[in-house]
Image (cartoon, helix red, strand yellow):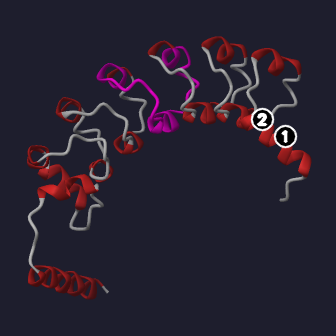
Amino acid sequence: MFLTYRDLTTKTLNRFYPWDSELLGQLPETWDWWELSRNAVIKWDAELIERYKTKWHWQALSSNEIIPWNATLIERYKDRWDWVWLSSNKALPWTIGLIERYKDRWDWDKLSSNKNLQSDVELIERYKHYWNWERLSCNEGLPWSVSLLELYQSEFLRASEGSVLFWTTNIFPFFQPISRETVLEICKKISSNQRNKT
């Protein structure tokens, strides 16, 4: 499918023009509400969201990091938000209280990858049965330390299930350099395991 010049112009205007509530109200049936919901230059506020709540594309709105996110806004539209997209949104006011209130709604895979969580050992411990430990191992927002690795080594090992975890580079300072011989030995074992699987 090809976009016409008019379609492209309309999409661009919907996505990048700083529309206000009055302009949006003039021709509500002509707008591309998906693009408007992703618009980062609209002056977002609770009144605007409420006024057009039946028009917004809530999946796109859930990922919009420019919205003035707060606990009241999240609660007001809790049945409209797309919680998968909301779980990835870096702009939410991430607190233990917010996570606890909606712990059964979050997408914990996405939340485990969210670098803007105000994560500390208390948060990790409280929800240790919810986290995706494989994704958590890549999260640069965690307070990486030797004690964190030791505290949750069994969770990280289980997540790897004998394969490789893609660790954040933030943990590299905690490892001692290994010899060339050790690296070659590890490579031989991996190659041998791969041949045995086929």
Residue 134 location, x and y as percent?
Answer: 29, 53
Q: Is residue 120 above or below residue 25?
A: below
- Label 1 packing within 10 angstroms: few (<14), some (14-19), many (20+): some
Q: Is residue 160 above or below residue 50?
A: below
Residue at image position (30%, 30%) is: 118
Image: magenta residue range = 73-99
Query: Do we see residue 157 in this rendering?
Result: no
State the separation of the CA atoms marked 1 and 2. Answer: 6 Å
Q: Quadrant of the N terminus?
A: bottom right
Residue at image position (20%, 82%) is: 187
- Label 2 packing within 10 angstroms: few (<14), some (14-19), many (20+): many
Which residue in the protein does label 2 denote? Answer: 14
Secondary structure of the residue carrying numbered label 2: helix
Q: Is residue 40 magenta?
A: no
Q: Is residue 90 magenta?
A: yes
Question: Which amino acid is tagged 2?
Answer: Asn
Which residue in the protein does label 1 denote? Answer: 10
From the viewer's perspective, tell me whether residue 1 is left or right of residue 83.
right
Residue at image position (73%, 36%) is: 16
Q: Is residue 144 above or below residue 196?
A: above
Residue 64 location, x and y as percent?
Answer: 58, 33
Is residue 91 or residue 78 the one in the foreground? 91
